[in-house]
Image: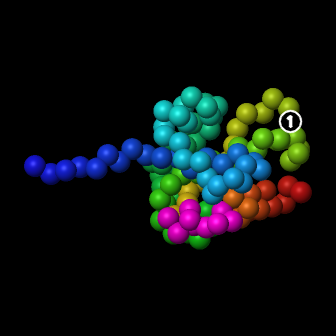
Amino acid sequence: MSRRRSRKPKIAHAPRHNHAGPCKVLTFAQMRATFPPNVQTAVYQTYRLKPPCLLCDQPCYRVGVFIPTDPQAYGIPPGWRGGCVYSLCLTCLRLPDLMDRIEALLWQGWG
């Protein structure tokens, strides 16, 4: 009898300016309870397609979601509910300045 490890997918979620830790890991159930439907769909598609890491193009290990807490700071209209979904490799997921790198890459040209 083989022992299987539970392989529940996880989502790396990082709201803007919440740099207390590298990221907050959510299960799909938690994601469904907190993310807008358009972001949920993007997360599922990203997990299915497994694009390369946003930062280094290595294979996907986790899916990340960047949801700005102040979208108007980037010129996004009031009432907008969404975020940016991306892949991360295991190496980049462990970077101490992960959120700063992601934020700089995703929002370059907006400021």
In percent of the image, x 66 and y 63: which residue is there? Answer: 98
Relative to 75, does residue 90 appear above or below in the rendering? below
Magenta span: 90-98
Identify the image quadrant of residue 96.
bottom right
Q: Is residue 106 visible?
A: no
Task: Count all numbered tags in the image, as a single digit.
Answer: 1
Residue 19 magenta: no
- Colour mode? rainbow
Image height of 33 relative to 50, above or below: above
Which amino acid, by three-letter code, is at mark 1? Pro
Q: Left or right? Give the position of 82 relative to 42.
A: right
Q: Position of residue 7 (x, y in %)?
A: 35, 48
Is residue 86 something that shows in the picture?
Answer: yes
Image quarter (top left, top right, bottom left or bottom right) of the C terminus: bottom right
Furthest residue toward left: 1
SS for dot 1: loop
Taking the spot 19% from the left edge, 50% from the top edge, the residue there is 3
How would you rate the neighbour count of disc 1 (Cα within 10 Å): few for under 14, some for 14-19, many for 20 or more?
A: few
Which residue is under mark 1? Answer: 77
Q: Where residue 50 appears, x then y in whole percent? A: 48, 55
Residue at x-position 48% and y-position 40%: 27
The percent coordinates of residue 85 (x first, y second) are 62, 49
Residue at image coords 48%, 47%: 10
Q: Is residue 47 left or right of residue 4?
A: right
Residue 62, above or below 45: below
Could you tell whether 3 is left or right of 70 in the image?
A: left
